[in-house]
């Protein structure tokens, strides 16, 4: 009977160790995924900021052309949305 209890305790201990290892692996994977997502978000944010500055610069240097382009895009979107 002593051997049976010891075997059960060993099995329970092994299961606890295994679940701790799995929990740690999942925690590490979630942290790595979070870091990657944050890095991708920061890169996208920087790219959008750069593009915004370029568009602003283009509008300021060529206001007439920018107005004509905006008018054309607006007319095209208006025509597409009417359908």
Image (spheres, rainbow, N blue to C red):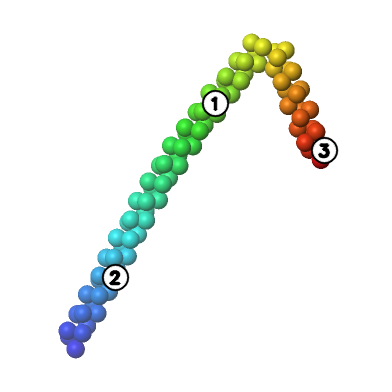
Secondary structure category for the residue under label 2:
helix
* Of callouts 3 and 2, the N-terminal one: 2
Question: How far separated are the C-alphas under marks 2 and 1?
Answer: 50 Å
Compared with 10, 33 (above or below) is above
- Which numbered dot is residue 49? 1
Compared with 35, 47 (above or below) is above
In the shown orientation, is residue 20 left or right of residue 39? left
Camera-side residue of 3 and 22: 22
In the shown orientation, is residue 28 left or right of residue 46? left
Residue at the location (37% across, 46% down)?
32
Q: Residues within 10 Å of mark 1 (few under 14, many from 20)?
A: few
Residue at the location (31% across, 62% down)?
20
Q: Quadrant of the N terminus?
A: bottom left
Question: How far separated are the C-alphas under marks 3 and 2?
Answer: 64 Å
Question: How far separated are the C-alphas under marks 3 and 1?
Answer: 32 Å
From the image, tell me which residue sits under label 3.
82
In the shown orientation, is residue 44 left or right of residue 61? left
Q: Residues within 10 Å of mark 2 (few under 14, many from 20)?
A: few
Camera-side residue of 26 and 81: 81
- Verify CB contact (< 8 Å) between mark 3 and mark 1: no
Q: Which residue lies most toward the right here?
A: 82
- Mark nearer the viewer, 2 or 1: 1
* Of callouts 2 and 1, the N-terminal one: 2
From the image, tell me which residue sits under label 2.
15
Secondary structure category for the residue under label 3:
helix
Q: Residues within 10 Å of mark 3 (few under 14, many from 20)?
A: few
Residue at the location (81% across, 40% down)?
83
């Amino acid at each position: 009977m002593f051997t049976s209890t010891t075997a059960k305790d060993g099995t329970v201990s092994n299961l606890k160790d295994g679940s701790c290892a799995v929990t740690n692996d999942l925690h590490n994977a979630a942290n790595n995924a979070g870091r990657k997502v944050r890095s991708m978000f920061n890169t996208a944010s920087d790219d959008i900021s750069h593009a915004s500055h370029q568009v602003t610069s283009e509008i300021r240097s060529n206001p007439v052309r920018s107005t004509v382009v905006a008018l054309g895009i607006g007319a095209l979107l208006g025509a597409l949305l009417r359908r």
